[in-house]
């Protein structure tokens, strides 16, 4: 199965013939996918569908049994240009509730200047929280701080893993508006992983749905039947 | 005076490393390695070499094994520590029985002793202390990122596995260095309690590290003075001073 989204433009991510298993349990089989630069893509699927596994394979955290992943034309098995990739992990804020770390210190985990910190926080409308403790912020504000940290190195690709878990609906809308703005204004390629098909389908431009139950004996694939362009706007 | 200088060095390095132990919620690693350190002491006393060198080898080896098991995720961190902590103590007791029982030297390593610190110890502790602080400063950003968010740290280009191994080695060295002053059974407390105290009152992670060093400094100096004049175990007195400061800070914060 193959998904091609606008092959006439440059590719941000290209996945070819990807296979992965945890021991005897096959998770991903013959996944092929091309995501062009400037895309705004959501990968959705229920728990156990392989979306987090696919994400870890894209980031090089896991190594595939077979197949390749390329980011901006570079095979990640040979080289990953981390300065082009921003990542917001699902676990970003878990360790921080008992630690008095400031927003500025979170951003400065990346090796950046003070000016770059200010620019990144401004881009997510969080400059006024620079000297506040992270734990004093709401869940949605914390997520914006982590996005700022991912943005501070001016990536071309931003990957977010379940970015709205634990966040209320109103804050989710604000959050997705921010992502749309980043995609349109800064031309950043966005890749979101989420279990919430309903919400994601109204926010992103393209949805890739992974559903093992649809293909019980194999394969979690990027099925053409489950790819659809959305009518998401900046609401 | 020798114990005083050794204590000051320990007061600096223990909370530096302890800060990241608290972030990672791995405070028990220090206790685990301190129990393994007893095995190193026993080996050193048995074969007649400086126990500090044997301790360093034992703790660094164990630190490497702990990190390998932890990073493979097949066994949880808690389970790994739950195996190694009693294992280290058990091995030490077996070796001690082979060496025909406890003696004054071993008790000094267990609970700390002012009189047991030799001039050679001071120089070794000083050298190792300089090394630990230097590595800490060089890799501060990497330690911070991997401690707070390992996945994101990886995507920043940080070699997470290597950094974690380096950090584990620093823990092992800190435990080995501090053992004679504070004692193997109590070194974990000195690494963690000043950090927790500082985090009650300070805004900012870097500032909390600085304040935790000051609190550890006060604990060590006060503890050594009180233990000297009251003829009490040095390590226990230092730790009780540290706990008292935590209680005082907590009370003042409520007021």
Image (spheres, coloured by chain):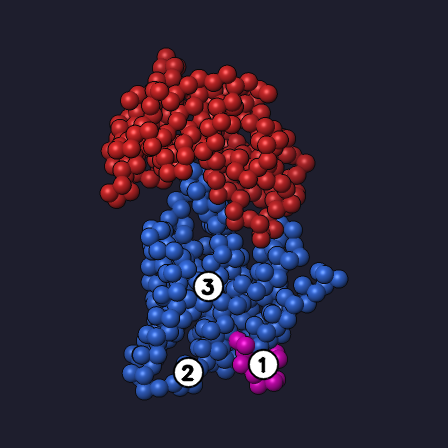
Q: Which mark is residue A176?
A: none
| Total numbered circles | 3
x then y, percent, for residue A139: 59, 40
- Picture colour for chain B: blue
In the rendered image, residue B235 lying in the magenta stretch gets the answer yes
Mark 2–mark 1 distance (CA, rounded to whole Å): 18 Å
Within 10 Å of the Cα at label 2, are there few (<14), some (14-19), or many (20+) other Cα atoms? some
Q: Nearer the viewer, mark 1 or mark 3?
A: 3
Query: Do pointers 1 and 3 mark residues of a single chain?
Result: yes
Residue found at x 54% / y 63%: B192
Is disc 3 placed on a helix, strand or loop? helix
Q: Position of residue B234 (x, y in %)?
A: 54, 78
Which residue corresponds to mark 2? B105
Mark 1 Cα shell of 10 Å, populated few (<14), some (14-19), many (≥20): some
Mark 2 / mark 1, whichever is N-terminal: 2
Start and end of the magenta stretch?
B224-236
Residue A166 in sight from this viewpoint: yes
Q: Position of residue A233 (x, y in %)?
A: 55, 18
Of A63 and B115, which appears nearest the observer? Answer: A63
Q: Is residue B72 magenta?
A: no
Q: Tell me where residue A56 appears, x and y as whole percent.
A: 37, 37
Q: Could you say which disc has been placed on residue B227 in the image? A: 1
Please name the residue that numbered disc 3 is placed on: B28
Q: Residues within 10 Å of mark 3 (few under 14, many from 20)?
A: some
Q: Are marks 3 and 2 in contact (CB under 8 Å)?
A: no
């Amino acid at each position: 199965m193959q998904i091609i989204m606008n092959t006439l433009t440059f590719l941000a991510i290209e996945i070819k013939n990807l296979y992965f298993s945890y021991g005897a349990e096959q998770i991903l089989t013959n996944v092929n996918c091309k995501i062009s630069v400037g895309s705004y893509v959501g990968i959705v699927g229920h728990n156990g569908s392989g979306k987090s596994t696919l994400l870890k394979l894209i980031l090089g955290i896991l190594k595939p049994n077979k197949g390749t992943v390329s980011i901006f034309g570079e095979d990640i098995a040979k080289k990953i240009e981390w300065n082009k990739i921003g990542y917001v992990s699902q676990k970003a804020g878990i360790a921080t509730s008992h630690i008095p770390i400031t927003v500025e210190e979170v951003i400065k985990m990346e090796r950046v200047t003070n000016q770059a910190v200010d620019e990144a926080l401004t881009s997510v409308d969080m400059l006024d929280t620079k000297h506040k403790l992270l734990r004093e912020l709401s869940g949605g504000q914390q997520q914006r701080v982590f996005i700022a940290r991912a943005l501070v190195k001016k990536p071309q690709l931003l990957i977010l893993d379940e970015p709205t878990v634990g966040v209320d609906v109103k804050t989710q809308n604000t959050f997705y508006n921010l992502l749309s703005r980043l995609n349109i204004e800064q031309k950043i390629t966005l890749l979101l992983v989420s279990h919430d098909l309903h919400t994601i389908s109204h926010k992103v431009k393209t949805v890739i749905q992974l559903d093992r139950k649809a293909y019980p004996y194999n394969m979690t694939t990027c099925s053409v039947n489950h790819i659809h362009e959305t009518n998401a706007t900046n609401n | 005076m020798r114990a005083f200088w050794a204590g000051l060095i320990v007061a600096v390095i223990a909370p530096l490393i302890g800060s990241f132990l608290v972030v990672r919620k791995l405070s028990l690693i220090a206790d685990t390695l301190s129990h393994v350190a007893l095995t190193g002491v026993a080996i050193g006393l048995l074969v007649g070499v400086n126990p500090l060198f044997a301790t360093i080898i034992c703790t660094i080896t164990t630190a490497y094994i702990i990190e390998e098991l932890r990073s493979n995720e097949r066994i949880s961190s808690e389970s790994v520590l739950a195996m190694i902590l009693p294992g280290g103590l058990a091995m030490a007791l077996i070796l001690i029985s082979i060496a025909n029982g406890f003696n004054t030297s071993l008790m000094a390593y267990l609970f700390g002793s002012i009189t047991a610190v030799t001039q050679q110890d001071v120089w070794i502790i000083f050298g190792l202390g300089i090394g630990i602080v230097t590595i800490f400063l060089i890799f501060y950003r990497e330690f911070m990122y991997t401690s707070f968010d390992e996945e994101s740290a990886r995507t920043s280009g940080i070699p997470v596995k290597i950094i974690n191994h380096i950090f584990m080695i620093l823990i092992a060295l800190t435990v080995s260095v501090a053992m004679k002053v504070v004692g193997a059974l109590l070194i974990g407390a000195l690494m963690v309690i000043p950090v927790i105290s500082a985090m009650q009152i300070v805004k900012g992670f870097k500032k909390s590290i600085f304040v935790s060093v000051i609190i550890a400094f006060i604990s060590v100096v006060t503890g050594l003075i009180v233990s000297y004049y009251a003829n009490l175990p040095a390590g226990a007195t230092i730790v009780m001073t540290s706990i008292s400061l935590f209680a005082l800070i907590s009370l003042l914060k409520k007021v």
